[in-house]
Amino acid sequence: MGFDEYETIPSSNVTDHMMAGAIAGIMEHCVMYPLDSVKTRLQAFMPSGNVGNRGIGTVLFNMIKHEGYLRPMRGMGTVIIGAGPAHALYFASYEHLKQKISHQTPLNTTVSSGVAGCVSTIIHDAIMTPTDVVKQRLQMSNSPYNGILNCVSSIWRTEGLGAFYRSYMVQLFMNAPFQIVHFMTYDYCQNFLNPDKIYNPLYHMISGGVAGGLASAITTPLDVCKTLLNTQTTNVRVEGLFRAVTTVYTLGGPGGFFRGMVARVLYQMPSTAISWTTYEFFKFVLLKKSNISDDRPPPPPPPINSALINEKITKKTSVRCDLPVASRSRIYSHYTVRDDGSKGQQF
């Protein structure tokens, strides 16, 4: 199957995109979840023994040693609940918008991918922002919550609904450039690595890893601000992006904006590679299945009354035919065949 055929799944086929996107989103977040827990510990400005100055391996080792083997996986259920619908809508809207923009505007496919990814982020973040709040509250050191339901009810009761969307605007400011860099880099890498335009999982994996790593490194400062807003308790109230930026600078200086960057890049590169590889695989399988269904032989024609077709009524008639070569008119006899009441054809 050629890449052009593979890439042009009908935009109306929303179910296929949503199914592939949901599976890709869950795989992306769950496989590398322990590194995400380490990143949260490194970025959170909490009184936890100055974790931000420690390395990734040290934080992960201490987390397992002092809190148990399953501690790095705490809060993963929240991601499974939120990432499925968030990524289903995200990839479905992305595919639809990418085709609309590329077909109805003079923009090339690379720019169209960036714009479509940026717009799709609004839908994605509306679902994932509350998920991130609960997830990061459960990930941070000395978390007072017993589980997902306890965390949700406690935040709702003590801080209100607004606490779940405290970092929504920061999330949008972060994910808009993230997705622009992400999708444009992915599309560029695909064009560079795959000039023959064929489906190849290795190309998707490499392109996704490079795109995710570059985008995550560029947007790390905003991710630190988002983590600060999500993990603060009722004792520390920071509202808005400007206050978050000033607070990060006050607590950590210029270097505070890049806390956990290595962990974020190491998390995003394989996560994005897994996400794109999974998504493209299921998209390919669903398209192939659709093509197989379309290639089925047409149904047999309805039965025909053979007696009616085979009926021939032969009638002998006499007509006068004046031939230009004849010296006089002659009478010629011929036969006509009448089929289904037609006027008849000469033979």
Image (tube, rainbow, N blue to C red):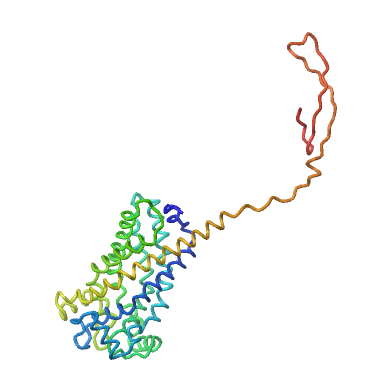
Look at 78% across and 47% down and name the residue there: 305
Where in the figure is residue 296, as x and y percent of width and height?
59, 55
Which quadrant would the C terminus be assigned to in this image?
top right
- Residue 38 quadrant: bottom left
- Residue 240 quadrant: bottom left
Look at 49% across and 62% down and name the residue there: 286
Query: In the figure, 337 relative to 257: above or below?
Result: above
Q: Nearer the viewer, residue 76 or 136?
A: 76
Count of all numbered marks drawn on residues in the image: 0
**Which residue is farthest top?**
327
Where in the figure is residue 202, as x and y percent of width and height?
36, 62
Where in the figure is residue 73, as x and y percent of width and height?
35, 83
Where in the figure is residue 191, as x and y percent of width and height?
33, 54
Q: Nearer the viewer, residue 68 or 89?
A: 68
Query: In the figure, 84 relative to 335: above or below?
Result: below
Look at 40% across and 76% down and name the residue there: 82
Look at 37% across and 91% down and name the residue there: 146
Query: In the figure, 305 relative to 164: above or below?
Result: above
Query: In the figure, 101 relative to 140: above or below?
Result: above
